[in-house]
Image (cartoon, rainbow, N blue to C red):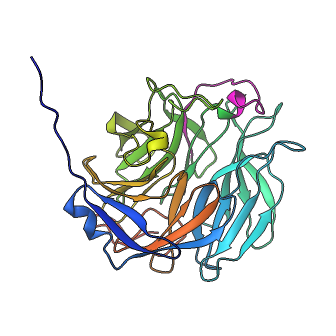
Amino acid sequence: MRTQRRIIVVPVVYIRYAHKRAIVQVLDPAFMEIINEESTLELLAEADAHEGGVYNPEDDCVYFSSSRQTDPKPNAQIMKVHLATGKVEVVKSETEVANGMVLGKDGALLVCNQGIRPHGGFIEHLNLKTGESKVLIDNWYGRRFNSPNDVVVKSDGSIWFTDPDYAWVQGFGAEPEVKNHVYRLSPSGVVDAVADGFVKPNGLAFSPDESLLYVTDTGSTIGDGTVDIQKPHSVTVIDVDENGASLKNKRHFASIATIVEPKYEGVGCPDGIKVDTEGRVYIANLDGVQVFDKKGKLLGMIKIPGATNMGFAGRDLQTLVILNGTAIYKITLSAKGAGLTGQVCTQKPKSRKAHC
C-alpha cells in the first residue's frame, strides 16, 4: 500500500537587512505578533561572539564570550558590544574558558568558566565597575564541577546553572567527578543538584512567573566534532516547586531540528534559550532563532545560520541580539524580554511584587 506524501507549504517573509534580505520563516500566524515586515535585521558588529548576549543597562552594552581558543593555551575572552554604535571592547582577556553568563542582582556579571585541567569549572563573580573577580562556587560537596555552561538568576537571588562535560570531551578539562546536572546555588551559599537525567544540559531559562524552568539538551552534539542524532536535541520543561528551590514534573517540551539550513538538515543543536513576557520560548539553533509558544508549538524562525545564543537588549528589552560565532545581529521585536535579572521590569505578576 502506497501512502501519500503530505506537502507543507511554509510561508517566507523577507525583512529589511543592512546588506541583503534575511529570511523569517513563518509557521504560524501568531509569529507575526512578535515580528512584522517593518522589522529590520542589522549587523551590529563582526566579532567572535559565541555565548552570552547579556544586556547591561548601566552602559547600554551587550556582554558575550568568544569561542574557545587553543593557542598558546585554552582561553576565551569576555567582551562587550555597544548597542548604539557596534563598537566591540575586551572586558577580560584571559579566563578559564568563559561561556554563558548573566547579570547578577548586584549588577556584577556572573560567568560560567569551564575550567582548565587539573581544575574544574566554576561560577565567577565579575565586578564590571572595578574589574574585581572572585569564584562564587567551584564544587559540589568536594567534587569539582565538569564545565558550567550557562547560568540564570531567579528573583530570590538564587543562581541556577547547567554543567555538561564538554570540557573533558574537548580535551582541555579535568576528568568528570559528577554527572551532568543542573545546579542551584542558594543566596546563603548552599549548592544543590536540582535536576539530572540529561546527556548535555546546556541553556536554561525561567518562565516569566518563574513557575517553570526550561533546559536545553545538546546531547546529540558530542563535543568532539561528531553528531549522534539518536541522542537528545531537545528542550525539557520542569515545574518549580512551591518552595521556589526545587523542581518536579520534568517533561518534554520540544525537539529541535533545522528547518531551512540544508547544511545542517535534520540536525538540531538547541543552545541558548530565552523567554519573553508572554511566555514564548526563543531557542538558538544551527539554522537560527526558533520561537515556540508556551505549549511547545513552533511559531517561526529568524534565520541566522550558526546561531549559538541571543538576548533581549535595549531600555525596553525589545531588541533581540543574536550571536553566531562570527557576528552579532540585532532586530527590534514587538515582544519584550522577561526573566532578566538586574534589568528593567517588563511585567507585573499578579500574585507577587513586580521584580526584574
- 96 vs 156, nearest the viewer: 96
Query: Which residue is at a point 87% across and 44% down the rendered structure image?
Result: 71
Query: Which residue is at a point 87% across and 42% down the rendered structure image?
Result: 73
Query: Which residue is at a point 71% across and 31% down the rendered structure image?
Result: 170
The overriding secondary structure of the stretch rendered in magenta is: loop
Picture quadrant where residue 338 is located: bottom left
Query: Which residue is at a point 27% across and 63% down the rendered structure image?
Result: 31
Is 168 magenta? The answer is: yes
Picture quadrant where residue 163 is located: top right
**Where's residue 193, x and y in %?**
54, 34
**Where's residue 182, x and y in %?**
53, 37
Q: Where is 42 relative to 307, above or below?
A: below
- 138 vs 11, nearest the viewer: 11
If the image is split into quadrants, where does the N terminus sit?
top left
- 52 vs 144, nearest the viewer: 52
Say left or right for 211 vs 164: left
- 11 vs 129, nearest the viewer: 11
Is 284 magenta? The answer is: no
The answer to whether residue 333 shows anywhere in this view is yes
Region of the chain picked out in magenta, as a range = 167-185
**Where's residue 76, x and y in %?**
76, 51
